[in-house]
Image: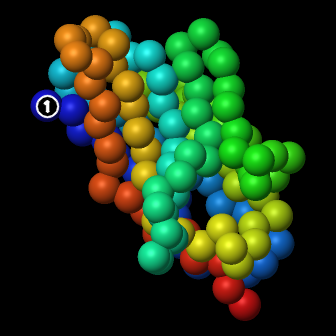
Amino acid sequence: QVQLVESGGGLVQPGGSLRLSCTASGSIRSLYSMGWYRQAPDKQRELVASITRDDTIKYAEFVKDRFTISRGNAKNTVHLQMNSLKPEDTAVYYCKITDIGTYPTKVSWGQGTQVTVSS
């Protein structure tokens, strides 16, 4: 079993900042990547940012220059620093990890943390 614990969501005014954190634990054999996705009401889940074990980073076009993904000092931890937040960033944010130490590759999701950007 893999456990993903997310934290840092909440209510913030437009232009504000939040920092999301995710720590993965449990039966992880070979962690390849960690990332953040989001899902707004009546919309599909979409990639926000991801980072691989060799530090290849990918950002969605809509968050470039506003969000920064980084590894934490603790093992299997990833952070998402979100600045200049907009109302359209409101969504449930999910942490996702990919473990390539199993066959087939195992993907695990966190329970999600709500981010609400509103005045």
Quarter of the picture containing the N terminus is: top left
Q: How many numbered marks does the figure carry? A: 1
Across and down, in percent, residue 27 comes to 19, 21
As rendered, which of 117 and 21 lies closer to the eye? 117
Residue at figure coordinates x 45%, y 76% from the top left: 42
Residue at figure coordinates x 71%, y 55% from the top left: 82
Indicate how the structure is coloured in the image.
rainbow
Q: Of the residues shown, which amino acid type is indicated by label 1?
A: Gln
In the displayed structure, 43 sits above or below 38; it is: below
The residue sitting at the bottom extreme is 119
Residue 81 can be seen in this image = yes
In the displayed structure, 48 sits above or below 119; it is: above
Q: Is residue 91 left or right of residue 14?
A: left
Secondary structure of the residue carrying numbered label 1: loop
Residue at figure coordinates x 21%, y 27% from the top left: 26
Residue 75 can be seen in this image = no
The residue sitting at the left extreme is 1
Mark 1 neighbour density, 10 Å: few (under 14) some (14–19) many (20 or more): few
Across and down, in percent, residue 45 comes to 47, 56
Residue at figure coordinates x 33%, y 48% from the top left: 110
Across and down, in percent, residue 68 comes to 73, 41
Q: Which residue is mark 1?
A: 1
Q: Is residue 119 left or right of residue 104?
A: right
The residue sitting at the right extreme is 65
Across and down, in percent, residue 119 comes to 72, 90
In the displayed structure, 81 sits above or below 91; it is: above
